[in-house]
Amino acid sequence: MSVDYSYEPKGLDLYSIEEKWLKRWDESGIFETEIDSNKPKYFVTVAYPYPNSPQHVGHGRTYTLTDVHARYKTMRGFNVLFPMGFHYTGTPIVSMSERVLAKDSELIETFRNIYNLSDDLISSFVTPEGIASFFHKEIKLGMKEMGYSIDWRREFTTIDEGYSRFISWHFRLLREKGLIVQGSHPVGWCPKDHNPVSQHDTIGDVEPDFIEYVLIRYNLEDGCILPTATLRPETIFGVTNLWINPNLEYVEIKIDDERWIVTPIAASKLMFLDHKVEIVRKLRGIELVGKFAKDNFRNVRIPIFPATFVDPENGTGIVMSVPGHAPFDYQALEDLKSKRDTLHEYKMDNIVSPIKIIISNMYQSESNITPAELIVKEFRISDQNDRNLETATSKLYSEEFYRGTLLPNTGNFAGLTVKDARSKVKDVLKSKGLVDTMYELINKPIKCRCGSPCVVKLLTDQWFINYQDSFWKKLAHECIDSMSIIPEEIRPEFNYVIDWLKQRACARKIGLGTKLPWDKDWIVESLSDSVIYMAYYIISKYLTNTVRRSSPEYINSSQLTDEFFSYVILGKGELQEITKSTNISVSILAKIRRDFLYFYPVDSRHSGRDLVPNHLSFFVFNHVAIFERNMWPKQIVVNGSVLMQGKKMSKSLGNIIPLRAAIKSYGADPLRLAMLSSSELLQDADFSFDLVKGVKAKLLTIYSEIIDYVSSTKSTIITTITDDLKKMDFEDRWLLSKLQGDISEVTKSLDQLRVREALQIILYSMEKDLQWYRKRKLARGNDTLKGLVLGEYYSVRVLLLAPFAPFISEEIWERMKGKGSVSSASWPQVNPEKIDAEIEGYEELIDTITTDIQKIIKVTKIRPNRIMIYTASKQKWNLYKKILDKMNQQSTGNFGQLMKELVRDDEINDYAKSNTELVKKMMGDILSDSSESRLKKIQMRSFDEERALNDAVNMIIQEIGQGDIRLEIISESNEQKFDPKKKSKFSRPYKPAIYLE
Ligand SMILES: [Zn+2]
């Protein structure tokens, strides 16, 4: 798919409007934020981008949402700081430059064809600096063109010297607090790059996740070790035999100072786990079948049997068989018993049949059938290659783990739960030297960005951040508990991640970034140097760099010592001494500290959903480790990603749309709206250019409506009505009342960043109300479309739209002669005096009746010349109000109970008793109302249907559109009424009866 450049909007040149306002914003410095003691501050940040490729439409959602948030808060009266930096750290930029250097055709084609970059430019990408500086500029321009309200004076990159000094300070602090440890730990690893890999380094952004196997040693008679991989060492009491796949190739290896037999894949995995491995000889699995191995733990001999379910990709290729508790083992044994030929072939007739299945734990009351057999029967398993065995296995494993207890045949372990016994058995095996450890990737295959499959490596002398520390976890939980998480439904994910996080490698040997301050062979990796940088935005403004020349206000990065950061960020140390040691003046130091105290903590942190398990959680962890409690972050906002017409955006699908190209042909405002209007926060947004076109058309309608109004009116355009409301027409009062509801709903939605909901109101439901208003006004015959009511309505609508579509809103605001910039105008307030439930009810009734009449005409095909509308009698209204009250108090829909209550009520009991059908109908009416409209009806003191309908006679007739019609509205209790078909008795409150002829 490509951008449709031919699409030209009529009547409005969005491009020049955007240029005009970008220039104005830039000149006025409207988004440059300084301390303002008259306003509460609001510090909003979003994950900074990696400049290793241009921004595409998919990147735009998170940033646009953050900008809408920032703009909304500004209009709500906050002094908002929204800064931006650029993340150069790590391998992505380096590996991309290596790919260009290696003339990687896929990458070069992408640059050429999707991003339209010239060959000259691409040839400058052979260095990391060439790539980073170009895309940094591109991304920044794109962000400006999108209208983001960023304070660009605070921009930095993560390889700036000042930033490196900040990260050094951060890491020294973590180490002082004992949160950085050195040791041997398994990590995801790229064998080609010789570097650990995490989410940002893998194709498809997958975080390598692995499990730990216990390798239990069995010995062949010649001393060679057969290691079996298990996750359930406590089942060792039930082992009856070993399994080997007769068709596979195995190797005998010399590992450290022992001899083992494993699969070749397992041998290579063991090499990465800090073992010295040499291959001695190759052998077929079949060679081992029928031999015996020694179980060193129980001191018994067990036979080796053949099984085809044994998977060379998993574990060692040798499996300990626990037929009592493992469905695979049970089934393989059954298969073997039933194959007389095989038994004969391997000469095992006399070995297999006496095998006695052992039950070593129990999770339900005893039965004479083993747990594995039970579940194999339940799942109707046919043989050991049955796919359902996986499901059966995970079901049984989980039952036993949570509910099982070890039986007396396990000796000292009897009575322990499976959960407890698992680690205790492992410890005992370990103390006897009977086990080793092996790691296996769970979510394989995972590929490094360089293309190599990742493995698990046991890294020795590696530096780790110890997210496993239980006190630290406790603080992180406290922070999450105290935070607002938007949307709330994602909170449990954070709690899960905090519990689950373990030690995490925090440094790499290659890539861009800051050296570990105490071990210069290592570079702090990208998910570790990006967790407290929000504090650096306060400082970066004061640093001289290529943009800012030196001046007395500015300091040099070489002046940023640990003492400087500790003073500014933590308030530690003496001002005078720090001035001496840093050569920064007292006034500037104090000023930076004041800035920090004013802007910190972070009020809202935005990011994509994929960063919950890493970045966002690390952000919380590191803040609670470094900062005082009052500086902990206040809020996290998470959003889903962007799909292109239902599909994931990817280079291979060719559906990546460069952001700047899209802005050029569709305009920034339509793009902003399209990114936010198609889905709720956590859902993936479905983007398409049809959507952009639709939104753009809507924006143009709003624009031209208001501009028409502006050019036709002589009165003050932006206004707030203060006249006597009672003197106005119904529809004027109605429109103002509806407007209050819209303000309140949009405000509520934006407080929770339910942007789709807000946009539905601003773009669609407000438009619908305007159409109704126009219809009513025109039917009245007087040309009041220029009135003040519209002035108020339009000005509020533009204000509500401004955070979403800032360019067009500024333009309209200016044309309306609004004061100042709409970006800093005040958010509209609800005026309770203008809320009028009765009038809203009137207009709703008029609308319903008009539609009902149209329906009747359509069904009966009558061309009416006389229409009668009968309103309900006073008696019916009394009954209705009683029912409404009683149903509201009881909040019940039980007819019998309601009747009992009505009969007890002297005012109404006779009437109710003789009209039970009517009571039933009214009850149905009330039940089918929304709770909102029911509430309105309860609050209303009076509701004069005749008055409402009489006000709209002309419009109803016009809507029916059939010329000469006589329309009468009359109460059913009026004796003089024309009612040839006795229709009037069907009238009910809010449901007048209709007759036409
Ligand atoms: Zn690699």
Image: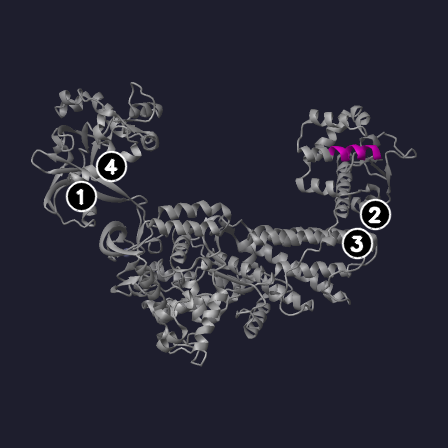
Pointer 4 with pointer 1, Cβ within 8 A: no
650 relative to 457 in the view: left or right: right
Which is more N-terminal, label 1 or label 2?
1
> Is residue 648 at least partly visible in the picture?
no
994 relative to 239 in the view: left or right: right
Q: Which mark is drawn over residue 264?
A: 1
Above/below status of 182 relative to 574: above
Q: Amino acid at mark 1?
A: Pro
In front of the other: 350 or 228: 228
Q: Residue at x 41, y 65 (%)?
A: 570
Q: Which residues are magenta?
A: 874-883
Q: Residue at x 47, y 73 (%)?
A: 591
Q: Tell me the element at label 2.
A: helix
The alpha-carbon separation of the residues under discs 4 and 1 comes to 31 Å
16 relative to 546 in the view: left or right: right
Within the image, what quadrant is residue 515 found in?
Answer: bottom left
Q: Amino acid at mark 4?
A: Lys
The alpha-carbon separation of the residues under discs 4 and 2 comes to 84 Å
Which is more N-terminal, label 3 or label 2?
3
Q: Which mark is drawn over residue 951?
A: 2
